[in-house]
């Protein structure tokens, strides 16, 4: 139970620190870059998933 409390406290502290950093111009630029990279990564994963799904469906249709 103590571990969960420390875990929650760490998450809360992280949010507070991130909020403080986001108040500065360099902080906003940093978080914008992180957001752009995360979105690009997610989009690449989704595209790969859809390509593979299409390949499997085409192979299934051929049989």
Image (cartoon, rainbow, N blue to C red):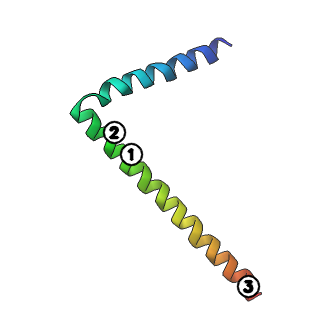
Q: Are marks 2 and 3 in contact (CB under 8 Å)?
A: no
Label located before the other in sequence (2 or 3) = 2
Q: 30 or 24, which lies in front? A: 24
Kind of element beneath mark 1: helix
Query: Dot 2 corresponds to which residue?
Result: 31
Distance (Cα) linking label 1 and label 2: 6 Å
Where is residue 8? Give x, y as percent: 56, 19
Where is residue 43? Give x, y as percent: 47, 59
Q: Looking at the image, which residue sits at the far top?
A: 2
Rendering quarter of residue 5: top right
The reply, left or right, for residue 3 in relation to residue 14 is: right
Q: 27 or 23, which lies in front? A: 23
Give the crowd class for mark 1: few <14, some 14-19, many >=20 residues within 10 Å. few
Identify which residue is drawn at 37% across, 27% down.
18
Q: Are marks 1 and 2 in contact (CB under 8 Å)?
A: yes
Q: Is residue 22 above or below residue 9?
A: below
Q: Are marks 1 and 3 in contact (CB under 8 Å)?
A: no
Rendering quarter of residue 20: top left
Query: Dot 3 corresponds to which residue?
Result: 61
Q: Is residue 5 above or below residue 38?
A: above
Label located before the other in sequence (1 or 3) = 1
């Amino acid at each position: 139970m103590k571990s969960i409390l420390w875990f929650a406290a760490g998450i809360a502290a992280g949010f507070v620190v991130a909020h403080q950093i986001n108040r500065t111009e360099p902080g906003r630029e940093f978080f914008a870059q992180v957001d752009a990279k995360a979105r690009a990564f997610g989009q690449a994963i989704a595209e790969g998933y859809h390509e593979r799904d299409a390949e499997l469906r085409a192979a299934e249709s051929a049989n």
